[in-house]
Amino acid sequence: MDFYLASTSPRRQELLRYLDYQFAVIDGQIDETAEVGESACDYVQRMAKAKAQRGYTHAALAKPVLGADTTISVDGQIIGKPLNLADSQLILRQLSGRTHQVLTAVAMVNAYQCQCVLVSTDVQMRMISDDEIIRYWETGEPCDKAGSYAIQGIGGKFITAIHGSYSAVVGLPLVESERLLNLFLSV
C-alpha cells in the first residue's frame, strides 16, 4: 500500500484506481459546516485538508493521506448536498439553465507537509422542469451529491457543456491528484 484515501466515496475510489497506486480507505468524516462568510474556494480547500489531516491522525501506518472535497458554487453561494426533495428542488431550480462552478480540492498530508490543489470547472446545465426534478429525485441518485446531481450518471443528461476537468466534477481531478501523489510518493 502506497497511501491512504480519506474518503468512502465510491466515485473517488474508482477514479483513483486509474492512477495505478495501491491505497487503503480510511475514515475522513469531519464536520462539513461552512464558516460564516467563507468563500466556496476557501471552504472546499479547508474541507479537503481537514479530511486528509483527520485520516493521517487515525492511520495505522505512517503513510501519506489524500483527502478531497467537492462543492458547487453559484452566485458566490456554496451549494452542498440536498437535505430532502424540497432542498433538491431548490438547488436544481437554481442551477437550471445556468452555468455554475464545480470546485474540487485535493489535499495530501504526511508528517512533514500538507499540499492542496483547487480545481474549478464551469458546468452549463439546461433548463430542467419541475417534473424532471421530481423524477430524478425518485431515482435516488441526487440524494448524496453536491449540487443534487451526478454528471457521471442520470444527471449527465442535464449538462450541456463543461469547461475544465470532467474527473474533478465527478469528485477527483486525476491530473492534479497524480501530481500530488508523485510529489509525496517519489521520496
Image (tube, helix red, strand yellow):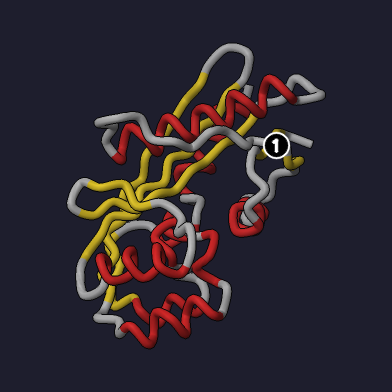
**145 or 23: nearer the eye?**
145
Looking at the picture, how far across and down is residue 168, in whole percent?
Answer: 44, 54
Instruction: Answer above or below: position of 69 versus 180.
Output: below
Name the quarter where the C terminus is drawn. Answer: top right
- Residue at x 50% of width, y 71% of height: 152
Residue identifier under label 1: 27
Q: Splitting the image into 4 quarters, where does residue 118 fall? A: top left
Q: Nearer the viewer, residue 155 or 22?
A: 155
**How far from the left and from the top, in percent, is residue 121?**
31, 55
Q: Is residue 22 above or below residue 123?
A: above
Q: As drawn, which residue projects farthest toward the top?
A: 112
Depth check: give the residue in front, 23 or 145.
145
Query: How many other residues sit within 10 Å of disc 1, few (<14), some (14-19) or many (≥20)?
Result: some
181 above or below 54? below
Q: Secondary structure at mark 1?
A: loop
Residue 127: x and y, percent?
24, 81
| Quarter of the image with the N terminus in it | top right
Number of marks in the image? 1
Q: Position of residue 155 (x, y in %)?
A: 44, 76
Quarter of the image for residue 36 reads top left
Direction front: furthest residue: 86
Q: Quadrant of residue 60?
A: top right
Residue type, label 1? Asp
Point 40% across, 67% down: residue: 86
> On the rendered structure, is 120 left or right of 84?
left
The residue drawn where x is 70% and y is 36% is: 27
Residue at the image point whose x is 63% and y is 43% from the top: 7
